Amino acid sequence: MKISTIAVIMAMADEAKPFIEALGLKPAVSAFDSRLPMEVYTGAVEKAEVVLVVGGKDRRFGVDNVGTQPATLSTYLAIDTFKPDLLINAGTAGGFKSKGADIGDVYIGSDSIRFHDRRIPIPGFAAYGIGSYRTPDVDDVATALGLKKGVVSTGNSLDMLPEDRLVIQANQGVVKEMEAAAIAWVADLYQIPLIALKSITDLVDTDTPTQDDFLKNLNLASEKLQEKLTAAIYYFAGNERPFADDTSLAS
Ligand code: SAH
């Protein structure tokens, strides 16, 4: 498979800004129904088309549309409109000091992407809740770009309840964020490979409150994210054998 259209899905405007500037992406104003908050930018890297969908602002609350529902919708719209052959979910995330994370480290999701806050203790539904969407084999790209690797774990809260902590541990999660597993669900429906790139804004197993770390480090982490995301796009654009094993998304 040759990668000719890459769709990048991001939640927050501040995360996206350095990337839009670095690639000189231009707004595509009427790409989606005008009632939707999502913002679309397009551009080109070598022979590949690059599309960026950002969640936009919530009409009532005025804040960025973070979390799983907007991410699901952004991904559906990106796929339906632009027919990408690769999806990249790029954003910020919490890391674990105990697992060697530092602020500004950029991880690529490896192995599987899982949910940690969908606890449904009914036969069959428990596993459905966790999701476990397989990632492509990212060893080559991780080595080429100097990325850390790990399981990305998704939930709809910035904080971490004791229950969440236990599930993240059981999930072998090393990156905690709020969108990737939702995007992986849509990617799996359409059988489009998904890469998750996550830059660490906060360390969830230290004493500093997550939100303080997050706000302090958002700009630094978004700049680091931009560097790796741009490098990833150059790596994938036109690449005929992007992953070490040829399977894309087999869950
Ligand atoms: N308080 C922030 C809200 C952002 S929500 C603000 O004022 O702007 C956090 C966003 O960053 C989500 O999109 C999520 O994917 C990511 N994120 C960063 N650190 C996280 C963490 N420790 N836990 C969950 N999500 C995190």
Image: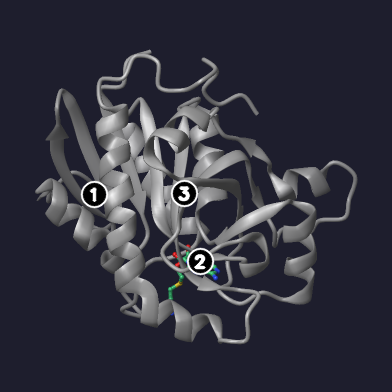
Q: Which residue is mark 1?
A: 33
Along the horizontal axis of the image, is 108 left or right of 77?
right
Which residue is nearer to you in this view: 168 or 63?
Answer: 168
Instruction: Determine whether label 2 and label 1 are within 8 Å by CB.
Output: no
Taking the spot 38% from the left edge, 82% from the top edge, the residue there is 216
Mark 2 residue type? Asp
Taking the spot 41% from the left edge, 47% from the top edge, the residue there is 89
The alpha-carbon separation of the residues under discs 2 and 3 comes to 29 Å
Q: Residues within 10 Å of mark 1 (few under 14, many from 20)?
A: few
Q: Residues within 10 Å of mark 2 (few under 14, many from 20)?
A: some
Look at the image and tell me in which quarter the N terminus lies. Answer: top left
Residue 176, x across and y down, in percent: 58, 61
Q: Nearer the viewer, mark 2 or mark 1?
A: 2
Q: Which residue is mark 2?
A: 102
Residue 180, x across and y down, in percent: 51, 50
> Is residue 143 depicted above or below 73 in this figure?
above
- Is residue 57 among what the camera can see? no
Indicate yes or no: mark 2 CB to ligand 1 under 8 Å. no
Which residue is nearer to you in this view: 243 or 148?
Answer: 148
Which residue is nearer to you in this view: 151 or 191?
Answer: 151
Taking the spot 25% from the left edge, 44% from the top edge, the residue there is 230
The alpha-carbon separation of the residues under discs 2 and 1 comes to 40 Å
First in residue order: circle 2 vs circle 1? 1
